[in-house]
Image (cartoon, grey):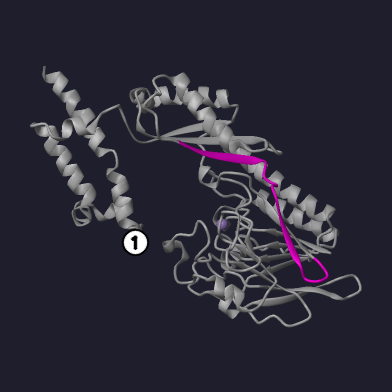
Amino acid sequence: MHKFLHLADVHLDSGILCRSEALRTKLNLELQAGFKRSIDFAIKEKVVAVFIAGDLFDADNLSIGTELFIHEQFQRLNEAHIPVIYTAGQSDPADEVGAVSDRPWPKNVIFINDASPKVIELQDVDGKPIARVVGAGYTTRKIEENLVLRFPQAKEQIPYIGLLHTRVHSAFGVTQEQSGTNACEVKHLKAPGYIYWALGGVHQHQRLAGIPNAWYPGNFSGRSADEAGFKGALLLSLKEDEEVSVEFKPFSSVQWFDLSLANLEDIDDVESLFRAAEHAFEDQRGEDGDINVQLTRLTLSGMCPIVDELKSETRRALIEEKLAYHLNVDDVEIRIEHLTALVDVNVYRNEPHLLSEVLKVIDDVSENTSLLDELTPQVLVRKVSDDRKTEYLKSLVTGFDREAIVRLTREDSHAH
Ligand SMILES: [Mn+2]
């Protein structure tokens, strides 16, 4: 049996969405430690090769320290006679990598920096072929071409493995505006008859549907609550009969949680908020694993009796700190979305005063797509594709009715 380690989207020296500078520094160190663990693992498991499907680092942010660190780790693989086959991705395209570093890679590293596929034959100690790896790289950050279409047909008698940074259309987590003109489809990956596709470019770990073995390991370590859960790489095992098995290895010691609470009508003090958050947290926690840093984002929406407390920045900061202590995590960020006090919209809807008129206008705007379109300044929607625009605009007016009632009824009470 032959083993291979498949990594992608490691994003060394990439931005981390966390407010504390000390914690950001810690997360960067944990990311490097996780990467080193994956190299230790490759050496221990005696893999045939390590594949990196792009975005190893962010070229516009790469520090000399990190560059040396990468070289050091590749050199360790070199000493263990393990080749690294690394294709340039969107954050580390060939032209930018060339500009930030002229340090030659250790001799075991094959950096594929060209859009035309390169075929590399991996052999065992007796010179018997194990597999052919076909890879293509991003020459520059923006490529308009679907590179998969250039990949050669597999030949018989030897397994072919594809290595590419590409956002497959149907992959979970790919939006239409992301897939763009170089969008690849599952049928394109199927066409050349490879036994495994080592993909990169989509940060959610997944196996693609509709093809036996096309995998994204997902990004190597979470950088925000949008990259929640266990993170790592894939161990690919190839048996004599060309049977493939794939195992996820959680190398990252960082775990983000993305929690949402929407039914907050009964949350009338901070303690009950903590209890609700704890419930949501325990649901997602899973096995502890080798996690050193845990960070949580808690999104609160809907109606909540303690909204004023949550909306005050200083109070919220204090609640965040206490909740982090309560959940025993390193950081909590509370995000409030369309959060208002308790109101019953229907009570005000038909009353003969200004408020019911305001509610009517808000209802009209929410339901009438063209009116919504007319009222929206272009600056708000220019980055949203047409098919998602209405949904996005509607999300912006969510909770306006409740907000209007809260504001106008407060004005009323001043007048009396
Ligand atoms: Mn990436």
**Residue 69 rendering spot, x and y as whole percentages:** 71, 51
Residue 30 highlighted magenta (yes or no): no
**Residue 360 rendering spot, x and y as whole percentages:** 15, 41
Instruction: Give the residues in magenta.
Output: 239-260
Q: Is residue 103 visible?
A: no
Residue 250 highlighted magenta (yes or no): yes
Quadrant, the C terminus: top left
Q: Is residue 291 visible?
A: yes
Q: Residue furthest right?
A: 126
Q: Residue furthest left?
A: 352
Quadrant, the N terminus: bottom right
Image point (23%, 52%), residue name: 376
According to the image, label 1 marks what residue? 387
Number of numbered discs on residues: 1
The image shows residue 118, relative to residue 165, as above or below, that is below
Q: Quadrant of ligand 1?
A: bottom right
Say which element carries label 1: helix
